[in-house]
Every structure is written in structure tokens, then in C-alpha cells.
Amino acid sequence: MATRGGAAPYRSSDGLSTRQVGNSDEIQLRIDPMHGDLDDEILGLRSQVHKLRNVAQEIHSEAKFQSDFVDQLQMTLIRAQASLKNNMRRLNSSIVRSGSNHVLHVVIFALFCLFLVYFWSKFSRR
């Protein structure tokens, strides 16, 4: 392998060779005409790079869409949580104001329904 300032060019097995141009850091590329299918290879690589770029752009747009969706979902959840807290606070203050007679009313209603079902089942058999 040669150094940058050396006279020996880099060679590849596919007919490409490089050499230094003067004292600059530029490199000249010379293609051996025996390997004419390099143009086809370059075109193939170019199309694959183009496809990869399109896939990367699609992935980027999908990730952005999903990120925006998650942000909206998070905001909706925060609003629902705040609304639920507000309603629970209202319910608790309403229960405190009206007293604990609600539980007694529910128990009496449940007993009434139980007796109603019991008597209905007794008289429907006959």
C-alpha cells in the first residue's frame, strides 16, 4: 500500500487505479476499458441508493406521524384526567353537602326490589 506522496498508484482488481495529481490532495480516477460493465454497476448502485433514500424518507415521515399522534393522545389523556379529577371533586362535595342518606336510600330500594321479586315469584307459581 502506498502513502499519499508516493509514486506507486493504488490498484483494484476491477481495473480502477488512482494516482496523485501534483502536490494537491486530489486523486484522479482512471477506469480500465476492459471493465465496461462498471457503468452498469454504478447505475445499479445509484438506483439502490435512491430506493434507500426513499425508504428512509418514508420511515422519517411515519415516525413523525406517530410522534404527533402520541403527543395528541397524551394531551387527550391529560384533559380526561383533569376532567375526571374535577368531577370527583364535585361528587365528593355533593355527597358531603347532602349527607350520607344516599346509602340508606339505596339499601331500602334494594330491599324493596328483593321483596318485590320474591312475592312475584311466589304468586306466579300458582
Image: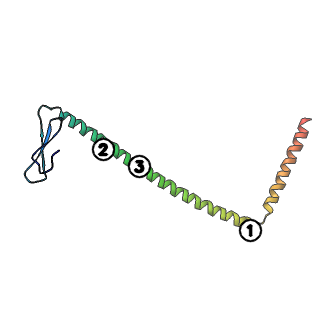
Q: Amino acid at mark 2?
A: Arg
Q: Secondary structure at mark 1?
A: helix
Q: Quadrant of the N terminus?
A: top left
Query: In what element is the residue under mark 2?
Result: helix
The residue under the point 74% across, 68% down is: 97
User: How many marks can you see?
Assistant: 3
Cα–Cα span, label 2 and label 3 = 15 Å
Q: Nearer the viewer, residue 42 or 100?
A: 42
The mark found on residue 63 in the picture is 3
State the image coordinates of residue 8 (x, y, percent, origin top left). Answer: 11, 44
Pick whichever, 60 or 31, lies toward us: 31
Q: Earlier in the sequence, mark 2 or mark 1?
A: 2
Of the numbered discs 1 and 3, the one sitting upstream in the chain is 3
Of the residues shown, which amino acid type is indicated by label 3?
Answer: Ala
Q: Nearer the viewer, residue 12 or 122?
A: 12
Residue under pointer 1: 97
Q: Residue, x 15% and y 35% (percent of image)?
A: 15
Q: Is residue 54 left or right of 24 when viewed as pictured?
A: right
Q: Position of residue 48 (x, y in %)?
A: 28, 38
User: Which quarter of the picture shows residue 37?
Assistant: top left
Which residue was labeled with disc 2? 53
Separation (CA) of disc 1 from disc 3: 51 Å
State if disc 3 and disc 1 touch (CB < 8 Å). no
Query: In 3D space, how far apart are the residues under numbered discs 2 and 1 (Cα atoms)?
Result: 66 Å
Q: Position of residue 75 (x, y in %)?
A: 51, 58
Q: Which quarter of the figure has residue 94? A: bottom right
Expressed as whole percent of the image width and height from the top left, the position of residue 126 reads 92, 35
Q: Is residue 99 above or below residue 120?
A: below
Task: Identify the residue at image location x=27%, y=41%.
Answer: 49
Q: Secondary structure at mark 3?
A: helix
Label 3: how many residues lie within 10 Å, few (<14), some (14-19) or many (20+)?
Answer: few
Residue type at numbered disc 1 = Arg
